[in-house]
Image (spheres, rainbow, N blue to C red):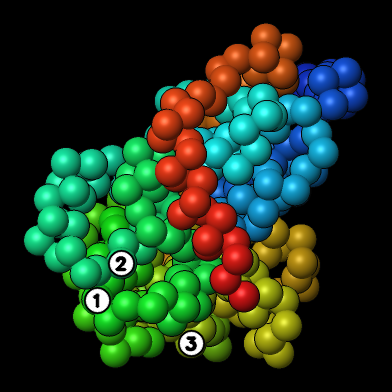
């Protein structure tokens, strides 16, 4: 019975992939998938990447339709950078708790108290927050963005853990918002030390969205893309991974002969995982749900994203 069920599921997957190929051609569509998506989505994506790479692809693509397999703010960023494209997300419930931890009224009040500060906002934020921002950043380019800003005072929104990490690479005054990623912030020193005891030859690679005391334990600290690149190029054959478990797809693909242990089984973003292959097909069939950003918000938010993309 189990073998029959597996074969039935495999046949359904083949049918979905075939239907998706037809729809992509029919709609002139491109599939962008974040590294934290389910394996079945990453397998069919035209581009896999972190927030920075996918923002670049959204800005550059010739496709008429962008299917953004990630969370809502990522779809918004794609729509802002490619306003003439139709941007779809497989499930509009895919939100980001960190992005919800900052509100426009609070940010405006903070700006009023620090009128000379430059607002640097992590891309994990809503379009409305980006519209109140001078320049955006991702974990991949956060340090470069901070160093590029011609200001001695920075309002940093919304991730306090990434803000703490970035603050170590600048002498600028950082006014840090009290937000965090629910998934990365869950990882503790105890989790890491237990894994290190189990796997003494493994290196610990960690995302800077984790708590500062966890980041300190890292043999390598970097964005998702940087972690994948480091593991691929490293001579080490075994790693403890301190970021969302969807990253395992690309890690195993790039380094099939290496061993990867996630630092805890709880490094799973439920919002990222709400998307699946069936929903990707359905959104292209129905052309819903579509991302909409009000023009007056998009115009202001676009400046902060474009400034980020200009930082080299």
Under circle 1, the secondary element is: strand
Query: Eyeballing the image, is 168 above or below 155?
Result: below
In the image, 111: left or right of 138?
A: left
Q: Observer-nearest residue: 108 or 233?
A: 108
Which residue does the image show at 46% across and 54% down from the upper left?
Answer: 304
Q: Earlier in the sequence, mark 2 or mark 1?
A: 2
Query: Label 2 vs label 3: CA separation?
Result: 32 Å
Q: Which residue is mark 2?
A: 118
Label 2 with label 1: CB-CB less than 8 Å: yes
Label 1 neighbour load within 10 Å: few <14, some 14-19, many 20+ = some
* Residue 306 visible in the displayed image: yes
Q: Nearer the viewer, mark 1 or mark 3?
A: 1
Q: Earlier in the sequence, mark 1 or mark 3?
A: 1
Q: Earlier in the sequence, mark 2 or mark 3?
A: 2
Which residue does the image show at 51% across and 46% down from the upper left?
Answer: 302
Label 1 with label 3: CB-CB less than 8 Å: no
Label 2 neighbour load within 10 Å: few <14, some 14-19, many 20+ = many
Query: Label 1 vs label 3: CA separation?
Result: 30 Å
Q: Which residue is mark 3?
A: 219
Q: Observer-nearest residue: 302 or 205?
A: 302
């Amino acid at each position: 019975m189990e073998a029959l069920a597996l074969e039935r599921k495999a046949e359904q997957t083949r049918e979905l992939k075939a239907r998706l190929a037809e729809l992509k051609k029919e709609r002139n569509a491109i599939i962008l998938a974040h590294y934290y998506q389910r394996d079945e989505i990453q397998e069919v994506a035209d581009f896999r990447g972190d927030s920075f790479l996918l923002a670049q692809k959204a800005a550059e693509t010739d496709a008429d339709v962008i299917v953004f397999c990630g969370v809502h703010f990522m779809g918004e960023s794609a729509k802002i950078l490619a306003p003439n494209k139709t941007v779809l997300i497989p499930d509009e419930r895919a939100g980001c708790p960190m992005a919800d931890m900052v509100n426009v009224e609070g940010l405006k009040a903070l700006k009023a108290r620090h009128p000379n500060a430059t607002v640097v906002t992590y891309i994990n934020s809503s379009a409305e927050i980006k519209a109140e921002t001078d320049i955006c950043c991702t974990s991949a380019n956060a340090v470069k963005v901070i160093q590029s800003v011609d200001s001695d005072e920075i309002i940093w929104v919304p991730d306090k853990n990434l803000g703490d990490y970035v603050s170590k690479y600048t002498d600028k005054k950082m006014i840090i918002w009290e937000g965090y990623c629910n998934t990365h912030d869950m990882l503790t020193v105890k989790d890491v030390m237990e894994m290190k005891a189990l796997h003494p030859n493994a290196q610990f690679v960690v995302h800077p969205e984790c708590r500062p005391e966890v980041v300190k334990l890292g043999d390598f600290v970097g964005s998702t893309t940087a972690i994948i690149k480091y593991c691929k190029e490293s001579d080490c054959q075994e790693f403890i991974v301190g970021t969302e478990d969807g990253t395992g797809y690309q890690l195993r693909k790039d380094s099939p002969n290496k061993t990867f242990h996630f630092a805890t089984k709880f490094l799973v973003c439920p919002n990222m995982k709400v998307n699946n292959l069936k929903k990707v097909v359905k959104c292209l069939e129905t052309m819903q749900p579509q991302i909409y950003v009000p023009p007056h918000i998009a115009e202001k938010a676009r400046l902060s994203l474009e400034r980020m993309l200009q930082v080299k």
